Amino acid sequence: MAEIFLEQIEEAKKALKIADHLTYITLPLINDDKLINMIIDNLNLTLIKTVDSLLSYDRYYKRIYNIPLDFENKFDIFKNEI
């Protein structure tokens, strides 16, 4: 269980690196508007994985008791508890 939040943060880092590369390297070279969707998707994945990681960390140390399945409720717990 302890490695879950570490795995999630690594996935967030990977998605952020991909978004960064697409933004600053690939997009200027190819100049295709479809890449913007991929960049936004990777930034969204970064946000989701980061919030999941922080919630899992607090759940592991029993600071919160439940992690909801939908992102809206996860984000509410993140705002109010973390």
Image: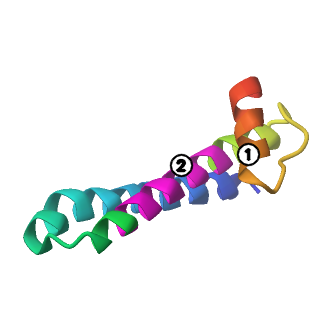
From the image, state whether disc 1 or disc 2 is nearer to you. 1
Q: Amino acid at mark 2?
A: Leu
- At horizontal 20% and vertical 73% (from top left) the residue drawn is 32
Q: Is residue 26 left or right of residue 34?
A: left
- The residue most toward the front is 33
The quadrant of the image that shows the N terminus is: bottom right
Mark 1 and 2 residues: CB-CB less than 8 Å, in contact? no
Residue ID at (73%, 45%): 72
64, above or below 42, in the image: above
Q: Amino acid at mark 1?
A: Glu
Q: Is residue 29 left or right of residue 73?
A: left
* Residue on which the image places disc 1: 72
The C terminus: image quadrant: top right
Q: How is the image coloured?
A: rainbow
Residue stretch rendered in magenta on the structure: 38-52
* Residue 58 percent across, percent down from the top left: 75, 37
* Secondary structure beneath label 2: helix
* Residue position marked by numbered label 2 in the rendering: 47
Q: Is residue 14 magenta?
A: no
Q: Secondary structure at mark 1?
A: helix
